[in-house]
Image (cartoon, rainbow, N blue to C red):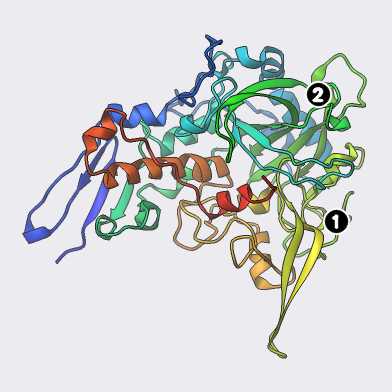
């Protein structure tokens, strides 16, 4: 009997099954897919408001001209010595959208400034700002902060970056897939049975693409002196374990700006930069108060260091630049060996456990570090592919313990990849975590709900809610702080 697959091509899904050599088909209506893919925000909204977050998913369908023209002016590899200049140009390019969002807050409209969002995240977005939960930090992550901190994020794409989103997701929000027919006889989720039916170049961002991520902390100036006078935003959401939605005031404390530039970063194709809030900067221009923490354009795979915290530029690193004048709180959470990682990024594990294996003695020892920097910006983004065949962090057991730093298993998370997937045979999303970890996961959750539903008409009428998918890393992240 020939192998059966399900092909999803531009708005319709056709299943070829081989029961008694007969073909049967099943289609998901375009309007049903669009409704879920381009949903603006959560259905739970405050009744005292009339204006809400609007998703901009009108992605360019032809490749636009590059807006960040500095990639052509710079035209050389980035180094520790010239990184600050490059970061200043990245900040300058993103300044209009950053300033407008800070000044307009809940009145900000991405479409008016020509920036875009990723699809399939509507059910998780808060209805005011469009944010969704980011990395939490347990109390003790920052000195003199004896409280847990929840984080929230909002990701935006310039037209060149948004073009790639449109290359992956069609106008209805579908992705061309092949689904092994054994899925339909299995109780397992669809994630284990799919492969993306696209040329791999479709998932690779074009040169000059720029992505900006805003990160917010629920700890404000009253609870955390470092946030004194930081820009305040109002969200409306419900966190894990809470019984209802409520308003929440949060401080903007980190802005990531990343650019695809293979000339500046020939080994990875990307330059990551992080701006952090500095209350001590005296200026009437709020953007001046967001200073560079640093930049990263590679993982320095040949530089091995221990697990001790590094809070300033590690002179061994040639592919990370750290601004030693950045506020101290932002340097407390630098990643492994001082590689770039911001205060929102979750690179430091409190009381992290490292497994030391002695093969000769056949012994296994677990060492607990009060502060364990076990990853970095680019290390965390490295496994961006169609599914997480490997855990997102260098861990053998989903974050309960971590690999020892000098082992091949750990160093696998510190390779410089360019176009290749982290695991062989996967579809690479080119260091963009929101595409696979967020959008693709929710898209597959939709498909899973649709096909596992006993009555598809219930789903079409909205009576059968899409079951959101939480993978092992999401579960690990929710356990990071005490509830």
Q: Nearer the viewer, residue 308 or 463?
A: 463
Task: Say which quarter of the image contains residue 406.
Answer: bottom right
Q: CA gap, disc 1 to disc 2?
A: 27 Å
Instruction: Assign a secondary structure to mark 2.
Output: loop
Task: Name the spot of residue 355 as percent of width and height, x first.
Answer: 71, 72
Which quadrant is the N terminus positioned in?
bottom left
Task: Name the spot of residue 463 as percent of width and height, x first.
Answer: 30, 31
Residue underneath mark 2: 230
Q: Nearer the viewer, residue 198 or 238?
A: 238
In this picture, residue 347 sits left or right of residue 371:
left
Q: Which mark is residue 309?
A: 1
Instruction: Assign a secondary structure to mark 1.
Output: loop
User: Is 313 placed above or below 365 here?
Assistant: above
Toward the bottom, the furthest residue is: 361
User: Is 143 placed above or below 48 here?
Assistant: below
The residue depicted at 84 percent of the width and 44 percent of the height is 142
User: Is 146 placed above or below 361 here?
Assistant: above
Task: Name the spot of residue 458 as percent of width and height, x first.
Answer: 25, 33
In this picture, residue 227 sits left or right of residue 270:
right
Task: Say which quarter of the image contains residue 68.
Answer: top right
Q: Upstream in the sequence, badge 1 or badge 2?
A: 2
Toward the front, the furthest residue is: 243
């Amino acid at each position: 009997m020939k192998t059966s697959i399900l092909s999803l091509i531009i708005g319709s899904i056709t299943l070829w099954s081989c029961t008694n050599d007969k073909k049967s088909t099943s289609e998901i209506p375009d309007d049903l897919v669009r409704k879920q893919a381009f949903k603006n925000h959560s259905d739970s909204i405050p009744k005292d408001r009339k204006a809400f977050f609007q998703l901009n998913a009108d992605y360019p369908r032809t490749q636009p001209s590059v807006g960040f023209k500095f990639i052509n002016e710079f035209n050389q590899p980035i180094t520790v010595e010239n990184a600050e200049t490059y970061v200043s140009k990245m900040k300058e390019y993103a300044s209009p959208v950053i300033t407008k969002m800070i000044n307009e807050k809940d009145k900000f409209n991405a479409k008016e400034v020509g920036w875009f969002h990723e699809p399939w995240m509507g059910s998780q977005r808060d209805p005011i700002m469009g944010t969704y939960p980011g990395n939490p930090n347990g109390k003790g992550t920052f000195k003199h902060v004896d409280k847990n901190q929840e984080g929230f994020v909002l990701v935006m794409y310039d037209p060149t970056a948004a073009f790639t989103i449109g290359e992956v997701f069609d106008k209805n929000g579908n992705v061309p897939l092949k689904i092994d027919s054994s899925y339909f006889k299995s109780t397992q989720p669809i994630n284990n049975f799919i492969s993306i039916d696209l040329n791999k170049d479709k998932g690779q961002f074009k040169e000059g693409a720029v992505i900006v991520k805003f990160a917010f902390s629920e700890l404000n100036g009253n609870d955390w002196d470092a946030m004194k006078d930081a820009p305040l935003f109002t969200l409306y959401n419900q966190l894990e374990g809470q019984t209802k939605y409520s308003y929440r005031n949060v401080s903007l404390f980190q802005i990531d700006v990343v650019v695809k530039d293979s000339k500046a970063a020939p080994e990875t194709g990307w330059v990551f930069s992080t701006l952090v809030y500095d209350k001590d900067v005296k200026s009437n221009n709020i953007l001046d108060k967001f200073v560079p923490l640093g930049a990263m354009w590679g993982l320095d795979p040949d530089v091995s260091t221990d697990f001790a915290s590094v809070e300033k530029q590690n002179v061994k690193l040639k592919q990370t630049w750290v601004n030693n004048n950045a506020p101290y709180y932002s340097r407390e959470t630098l990643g492994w060996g001082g590689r770039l990682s911001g205060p929102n990024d979750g690179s430091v594990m409190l009381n992290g456990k490292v497994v030391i294996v002695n093969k000769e003695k056949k012994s296994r020892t677990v060492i607990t570090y009060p502060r364990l920097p076990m990853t970095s910006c680019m290390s965390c983004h490295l496994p961006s592919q169609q599914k997480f065949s490997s855990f997102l962090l260098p861990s053998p057991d989903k974050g309960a313990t971590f690999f020892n730093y000098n082992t091949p298993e750990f160093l696998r998370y510190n390779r410089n990849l360019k176009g290749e997937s982290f695991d062989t045979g996967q579809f690479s999303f080119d260091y963009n975590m929101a595409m696979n970890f967020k959008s693709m996961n929710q898209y597959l959750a939709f498909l899973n709900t649709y096909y596992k539903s006993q009555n598809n008409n219930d789903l079409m009428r909205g009576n059968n809610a899409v079951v959101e998918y939480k993978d092992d890393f999401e579960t690990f992240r929710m356990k990071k702080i005490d509830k």
